[in-house]
Image: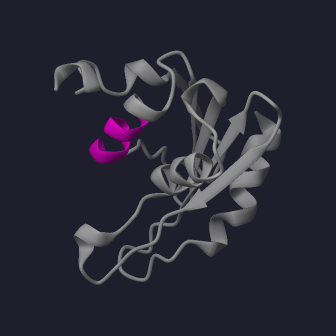
Amino acid sequence: MDQLYEAAKKVLPNAYAGYSKLHVAAALKLKNGDIITGVNVENASFGLTNCAERTALFSAYTQGYRKEDIEAIVVTTNKDDIISPCGACRQVMGELMEPEAKVHLISANGKRQTLDNKELLPFAFQKEDL
């Protein structure tokens, strides 16, 4: 997890967070050892903002990876408290990552919490619900 955390910290300054000042970075660890990162990118039209978790996941899918390829995700921030993924990210993570994939939440001062992806959004809306 430390290598994944370092990858997320490295891209954290790249966040575009001029409105909230909340910088968030995510790093996915793939089962083949690759790491894919993402940061939050805000927009003056707040609904168009993209979170770090979704940026990393969408990048992985763009590169041809799928849920079975993802082992874990680290989410870190520039704040001293642990930040949990928002509802939209939880829904996307619920669909694009395996239920047992590890989610590591790490604050700027090193506080850590680890969960299984399925714990983030019980009763997530799935394709089977359509």
Give the image location of residue 100, x and y in percent. 53, 15
Q: Nearer the viewer, residue 96 or 21?
A: 96
Question: In the rendered image of this protein, does residue 122 appear above or below residue 90?
Answer: above
In the image: residue 123, left or right of residue 74: left
Residue stretch in magenta: 86-93
Give the image location of residue 23, x and y in percent. 52, 66
In the image: residue 63, left or right of residue 24: right
Q: Taken as a whole, is the magenta stretch helix, strand or loop?
A: helix
Where's the N terminus, which quadrant?
top right
Give the image location of residue 106, x and y in percent. 59, 42
Count of marks overlaid on the render: 0
Q: For residue 50, what is the image quadrant?
A: bottom left
Task: Name the residue at 58% across, 34% down.
Answer: 66
Where's the C terminus, which quadrant?
top left
Q: Nearer the viewer, residue 127 or 92?
A: 127
Residue 29 on the magenta segment: no
Give the image location of residue 82, x and y in percent. 49, 43
Question: In the rendered image of this protein, does residue 39 appear above or below residue 123?
Answer: below
Task: Name the residue at 37% across, 73% down.
Answer: 20
Q: Nearer the viewer, residue 27 or 22?
A: 27
Task: Name the residue at 65% across, 51% down.
Answer: 63
Question: In the rendered image of this protein, does residue 83 appear above or below residue 73?
Answer: below
Task: Name the residue at 65% across, 72% down.
Answer: 13
In the image: residue 96, left or right of residue 124: right
Q: For residue 17, what is the image quadrant?
A: bottom left
